[in-house]
């Protein structure tokens, strides 16, 4: 299994990123006036020196100072850098934008996406429809120094506003898990977003218990210290969409009075999957009969049983709204791989997935066995 802190891996990655950082980002060479339809414009302006800082942020993470202009809003001072992990090697970079709003620093991801047109935003829509405070995606046409960079989603990063949702001061961690069986202190991998201290004790306790407790101990501890309902909301959507890249990272853990999981970077999705996710924490949640009952009930109501709580048609409506908004801008995308064919292919695939996923789950022997197993049956 991979270890993100292994020396050879980081050396190779650094070298690749350094080579990729040379030259211009995708889009800068375009001189054709783009067609962006009804996409709102987001314009970033940098001096030559700060533009070089932005190039260098592929490997340095330094922010470049800039001016930001949005439609129907006064220009603002801001800062921008490249963001991501392996996605930094892609020609179409994602960025972090830092601005001051109402006296507080607010950060946004300018997300280029993996399959960029629909997957990521639609998955995050589903989490919100399921009742989680996942960030909303605002499509925009991004320009840097008047060069069209392409269609991006503007995504507010999780911050301390989460505390107002759950009514008490909390702790938020951006997760990077070590290899199972070689558990390290969480502070060596994961990042604490707030509050601003180096106390990782709650996260360490969760990871160590998930890795080492026997089943009766884990179930007893977990049912007291984990928010079962909200964690089920996360896992049901993750499992329906088959988000594949959540073994080690691409999710947050938020502690209010109890722990819960929040989604992030779910562009690698719309695949077949099994109930229980694909990392140590989500798999072990299924050891609790009480949690399994919550999970099954929620999965049925959101995706399998027709009724007012089923969100499948809402997702189809959202898919169509996004298609109508983005289609005029497709011919102007700077990346040669982002053409009308890729747009229509991704749309058709997701439309088919939403039409067939529920039937596929109900006809799958593994899922069928899970949904038909007796409720609240204790493990022996």
Image (cartoon, rainbow, N blue to C red):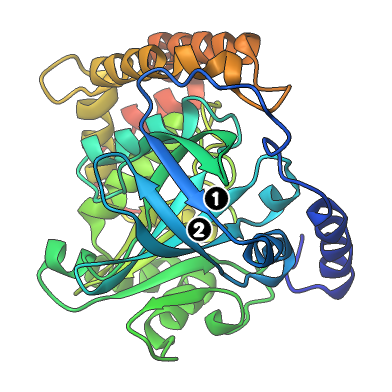
In the drawing, does residue 37 fall left or right of residue 10? left
Q: Earlier in the sequence, mark 1 or mark 2?
A: 2
Q: Residue at x 26, y 73 (%)?
A: 104
**Residue toward you, 48 or 231:** 48
Q: Is residue 248 left or right of residue 303?
A: right
Describe the element under mark 1 as helix, strand or loop. Answer: loop
Q: Tell me if residue 119 comes above or below residue 212 in the rendering.
A: above
Q: Which residue is mark 1?
A: 246
Q: Is residue 19 left or right of residue 324?
A: right
SS assignment at label 2: strand
- Spot occupied by residue 120 in the image (x, y as percentages of width and height): 47, 35
* Quadrant the N terminus occupies: bottom right
Nearer to me, 179 or 158: 158
Dividing the image into 4 quarters, which one contains the C terminus? bottom left
Tell me where residue 82 sits by quadrant.
bottom right
Q: Is residue 286 above or below residue 226?
A: above
In this picture, residue 328 sits left or right of residue 6: left
| Labels 1 and 2 touching (C-beta < 8 A) | no
Quadrant of the rendered image containing residue 168: bottom left
Q: Is residue 16 visible?
A: yes
| Residue 276 visible to the viewer | no
Looking at the image, is mark 1 or mark 2 nearer the viewer? 2
Which residue is at 54% across, 71% downward?
211
Between 162 and 130, the one lying in front of the other is 162
Residue drawn at (37%, 82%) of the image = 202
Q: Is 239 above or below relative to 234?
A: above
* Classed neighbour count for the residue bearing mark 1: other residues with Cα under 10 Å, few (<14), some (14–19), many (≥20): many
What residue sits 31% from the left and 16% below the top?
Answer: 321
Residue at which label 2 appears: 96
Q: Provide residue 343's location: percent of width, then percent of height.
A: 56, 15
Q: In 3D space, how far apart are the residues under numbered discs 1 and 2 (Cα atoms)? A: 21 Å
């Amino acid at each position: 299994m991979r270890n993100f802190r292994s020396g050879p891996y980081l050396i190779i990655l650094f070298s690749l990123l350094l080579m990729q950082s040379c030259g211009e980002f995708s889009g800068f060479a375009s001189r054709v006036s783009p067609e962006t339809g009804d996409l709102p414009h987001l314009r970033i302006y940098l001096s030559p020196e700060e533009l070089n800082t932005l190039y260098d942020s592929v490997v340095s993470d330094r922010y470049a100072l800039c001016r930001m202009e949005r439609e129907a809003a006064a220009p603002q001072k801001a800062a921008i850098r490249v963001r991501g992990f392996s996605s930094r090697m892609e020609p179409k970079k994602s960025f972090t934008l830092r601005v001051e709003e109402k006296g507080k620093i607010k950060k946004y991801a300018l997300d280029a996406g993996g399959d960029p047109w629909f997957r990521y935003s639609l998955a995050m829509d589903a989490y919100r429809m399921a009742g989680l405070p996942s960030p909303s995606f605002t499509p925009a046409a991004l320009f840097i120094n008047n060069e069209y960079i392409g269609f991006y989603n503007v995504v507010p990063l999780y911050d301390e506003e989460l505390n107002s949702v759950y009514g008490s001061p909390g702790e938020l961690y951006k997760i990077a898990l070590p290899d199972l069986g070689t558990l390290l202190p969480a502070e060596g991998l994961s990042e604490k977003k707030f509050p601003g201290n180096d106390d990782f004790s709650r996260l360490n306790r969760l990871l160590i218990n998930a890795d080492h407790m026997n089943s009766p101990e884990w179930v007893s501890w977990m049912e007291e210290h984990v928010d079962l309902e909200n964690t089920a909301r996360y896992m049901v959507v993750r499992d329906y969409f088959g988000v594949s890249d959540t073994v080690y990272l691409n999710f947050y853990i938020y502690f209010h009075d109890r722990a819960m999981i929040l989604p992030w970077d779910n562009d690698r999705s719309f695949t077949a999957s099994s109930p229980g996710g694909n990392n140590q924490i989500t798999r072990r949640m299924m050891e609790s009969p009480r949690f399994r009952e919550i999970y099954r009930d929620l999965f049925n109501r959101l995706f399998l049983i027709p009724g007012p709580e089923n969100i499948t048609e809402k997702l189809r409506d959202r898919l169509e709204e996004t298609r109508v908004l983005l289609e005029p801008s497709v011919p102007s995308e700077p990346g040669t791989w982002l053409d009308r064919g890729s747009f229509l292919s991704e749309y058709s695939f997701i439309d088919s997935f939403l039409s067939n996923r529920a039937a596929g789950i109900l006809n799958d022997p593994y899922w069928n066995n899970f949904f038909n197993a007796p409720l609240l049956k204790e493990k022996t």
